[in-house]
Every structure is written in C-alpha cells, then in structure tokens.
Image (tube, grey):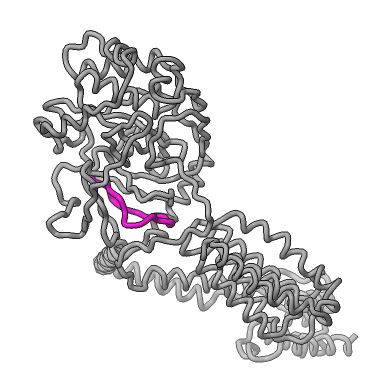
Amino acid sequence: MFKDVKIKFSTLFILTSILFISASDYKFLTYLPLIVTTPLIRKKYGKIIAKGSAEKLIESFPLAYFIFSLIFGVNLFYTLSNLLVIILFAKQILPCKEKDYYEIFLVGILLILLSSVSTISLTFGIFLFAFLVSGTLMLTFSGIESNNIKIPRAFYHKVVIFSVISMLFSFVLFFSFPRLSLGYFHGIRLSPESQSGFSTNVVIEKGAVKLNNRIVMRVEGKSLLPPLYLSGMHYAYFTGSKWIKTQQISKLFPYDSNNDFGLTFGLVKSTIFLEPNGTDVLFGPEKLLGIHGEFLYLRKNKFGDFLTDQIYYKTIKYDAFSSITGKSNILIRESLSRSEKEKYLQLPKLPETFKEIAKEAAGNGKTAEDKAKNIADYLRKNYQYSLNPSSANIEDFVINKKTGYCQHFATAFVLFARINGIPARLVSGFVTREYNPDGEYFIVRAKDAHTWAEVYITGKGWIRIDPTPPSAPPKLSHLEMLIDNIKMSWYRNVITYNSAKQIQMLHGIRSHISNLSLSVLNSVNITKNLFKKFKNILILILIAFLLFIILRKRKPTSKEIAVLNMLEKRIGEDRKKSETLLEFAARKGKLSKLKEPIMLYYKLRYSKETENLEESEIIKKIKILVKEIT
C-alpha cells in the first residue's frame, strides 16, 4: 500500500508530526495506527469517497469537531491539537493535489508549535531530524506526476546530509540569536489532566496513596547533602481535618536592586529545574530566603513561601538561596512575638485521651528541644507507616488505628508539640535521597512528596523534625543515571537557555579564543627560537623533505600494472630486476617492434603531460599495437 511515493512520504511526515504532539500528551499516540491504515482505506474506498457525499462529510468533520468541542468546553489548546491531527487524517484519506501536501506541511509545523508551548523534551531533537527528512521527501515528490518512481539510494543520502546541515544551522541560530529576558512563558496545558505528587491541600483522611515515579524536578548545588528537604508550603492553622493555607500574599520583584538575594552573604545557592506539577508553588532547600529566575513577578506569603503568578506548564529553571542548618544560619530570631506564639500553638477540639498521649510522648524532657525529639521518637516507635491508612481523622490515627503516612505523622507531631507548649508548624514539599553522581544533581520524583514539621526553639529558630519513619534510599542502575544525565544536559543547555547563559557562553568563547591566540603566539615564538638555534639543521631537513616530494615515485594504478604485465609477457619471462623495459626488449631482440607501445607506457606511467589525456585511450592504443605485433 506504500508503493505510491507521495503517500509513503506524506504518511511518514504525518506520523512524525503526531510524535511531536505526543511529547506533550501520550494520548495522541492512539492516532498512529489510524494514520498508518489510511493509505489502505484510500486504496480500497478512494473511488467511492471521491464520487459520493463522503468526501464532503470528511472535509466538514474537522469543523464539526471544533464547534462541538467549543460548545462542551473542552480545553482550547487540547481541542486545537486534536483538530490539527484530524485535518491530517482527512488530508491523507482524500485524494491529494500538490497544494494539499504544502497544507499538510503547514499543519505539521503548527503541531510542533503547539507541542513546544506545552513541553520540550529530549525527544524533540530526534523528532526534529525526522521531521526535516520526511518533510523534505514529501515536498520534493509532491509536484511529480508519476507515482511509482525508483529512487536511487544516493538521493536518500543527500536528503540526510541536507537534514544534518539544517539541524546544525538551526542550533547555531538558536545559540547565537539574541535572547530576550521577558520572563518565562507559562506554557499551555494540552492535556486536561494534571499529574502531581504534591498538593497544597493537606487533608487527613482515609484512602490509599498511589506512588508516582515521574520526575518532578532536578536540583544541583555544591553544599547539598542527602536527605535533601525541599520546602514548598508552611501551615499554621489546623481545623481538625485539614490545614489552612495563608491568604496574605504580596508581589515580589526578584530583579529589584534592593532585593538581590544572589549577593547576600551567607546563603547557600542551589539551581532547580522544575517540571510542570499543576501548582504555582516554587520549591527550595530549607530555609528558603530568595528566588532568582526570569519571572515577571513572584508572590510571597508571611511564611516566606514563594509562588508564581500563574501555574507553569513548562520546565523552568531558577536559583534558590537558602539558610541551610550547618551551612548558614542567618534567619535566627531571638524569640517569637506573642501573636506568633498564639498562631503556632493553635489547637482544634481534641479529646482528653489525645492530650494524654501527647504528654506521654513528650516524656521527661527538660527543654522544648528535648520534648520535641521525644515526641518524634515516640511516633516512630509506636506507629506504623502505611500507604493505605484506614484512619478517618487525626484522632482515629493517634488513639485507634496507629497507621498512616507522612501527613498523619507530621500532623500528630505538630499537635503533640503544641499541647506541650512548643510552637510548631507543618511543612509540605519533597524529600529525596536519589543522587546522580555523573551529573552531580539530585533527582526528585512525584513519590518523594512529603510532609514534615518545624518547631521553634529560642536561640536556634525554626528546626526541622521529621517524625515519619525513614524509608530505604532508592537504587538506580548506571544506565538510568546515564539516560537522566543526558536529559539534564538537555535542560541545562537548551530548555533553559536564556540571555544570561548566552552572555556567559560568549564570554567563554572569547576566553578560549584569547587562550588559543596566546598559545599560537607562544608556539610561533618557540619555533623562532628553535629556528635560530638549529637553523642549519632545519634547512637541511627542509631540503631533504622537498627532494623526497620531488623524487618520490607515484604508485602505479591497477590498470598500469596490467599493461606492464602484458608488455613483460610479450617480451619474455626472464626480466632482471635492474632492467628497464627498453633494455629488456633490446636484450630479447624485440625493441624495434615494441618500442612504440613501451614508450606509450612510459608516457602513461611517468609523464605529467598525460594528466589531461584520457588514460583509457592510451591503454587502448597500447593494446592495439601489441595485438598488431602479435
């Protein structure tokens, strides 16, 4: 069914275009079998479709789908993506003229643009190359009337070379074209569903938790050690069933010269590559103080949590500046205000049994810090971790069931601490022990979403305490690390390529050129000094080299060897090593007969005048002369 070159290459191009949009949402892969079978449908039912009303029905179907999607409120960009794929299907199943192939190419470009505003994965480079090859082939043969054309293999080689050159040229333009720092484009959610292991709604309820292995961010930094805690949101008020988010949010302009966190002394810098996660929260190693990135503006609440102006659906890169315990402690305050103490000691209505257990957990600790550690140890020893808890609420978890996951443990700890008079709050974010030593960065997955607690200790500030029993660190194979390291390189050098990185790259190129220039000058000076010291020896070596080039004999070609063997055979069989052909022929008494073909051979073998002559003509003449003599 793919004998028609136009159908073959248009099908290949459409498949490539669908693979592009599939990088944003894997559901589009379901179109691939349909597109592959369209040539067969066209071959069997093409005449029926062309004659009847079926052609008009197929042509009007994309418009009908678009109107239907708008009426029922389907996501606009998801609708547009499906619409473009349906148009490609309609174009493929209907008879195509030359202009139709150009329209198919245009639709393919639109699909690439739609996919690029949603996500840019490593597969984009591979798909782009396939797009160039298939698009070139389709457009090349679109205007040819004959369908069954025998295409030489050399043509495909040229198309591949052209595509490689185009790719290289595209990368040169990408890295050299001036970049504009106007804030990150938020991207567009093509899929109506959103996968995320993190949620801003911390609710205590029963039900199973499913682990998701999808990578949500990668973090690199020199001072980071496992386990790496990445805070996102802090909570103070607990209703008895859920934690309430603060509503006091202010705008923050990170490029304000009076707010340059990057130059603040004592902060630990980390660089984060955050995948779209369905929230507007930015994460960073605790205690997070500042964010640097190409944002138009950020929001910051009273806890110091950073949020974007909108949800991002593209990979974003930013620098986080933190006061990590043991590395930097510049956020310590002597004490909390009265209102802050009341906020962090707030309690919902709790049964007396709950409070008695809290007092028991604190034990005989003399200081607030001792009591907090006793509470954490008590929870780890007496309660079990489970991804399928049956506790209906926090009282049921503490008093009856005693099984739950991190939200249960952290909430119970905060309430226990507050009952014992220790200011405490809840923190949600991620914790990971997964480190890629090849790329020197941490990998954070959706399943690493975590909840822990912080207690306020006078003179030490907020201290993290994680009462949840620790899990075993993950083990990654070398192959998995290598593949993810390639993805990380793609993010570092392509996805998050901006004006700052471009300037840095240009400075690096200039520095390398300067170093190369210095190296060349040093080499020239060294050569001059050597020439002065060994001038006579170098001149002799140069003369010897020139003589070698001049006197070097050119190796005979296979045709010249064949002619020589023919002449030797005609003269005789006892030619001496020191004899020339002329001397050999004279000794055998055949010089007069064979002098002309021998001289032609010498002309062919040694004379520069034969460079512009046809070698085959000389050989042909030698053979004729030898044959005549014979």
In the image, farthest residue toward the right: 630
Question: Is 506 on the left or on the right of 103, as rendered?
Answer: left
**Residue 335 x/y as whole percent:** 10, 30
Residue at the (20%, 35%) spot, across then down: 327
From what the image shows, is residue 383 above or below residue 189? Answer: above
From what the image shows, is residue 468 above or below residue 235? Answer: above
In the image, farthest residue toward the left: 334
Residue at the (50%, 69%) spot, across then down: 113
**Residue 260 x/y as whole percent:** 16, 54
Residue 293, quarter of picture: bottom left
Q: Quadrant of the N terminus?
A: bottom right
| Of residues 94 and 543, the one drawn nearer to the viewer in this rendering | 94
Residue 399 shows up from this direction = yes
Residue 501, quarter of picture: bottom left
Residue 534 shows up from this direction = no
**Residue 400 x/y as whole percent:** 44, 15
Residue 476 inside the magenta-drawn segment: no
Which region shows up in magenta? 306-321
In the image, farthest residue toward the top: 364
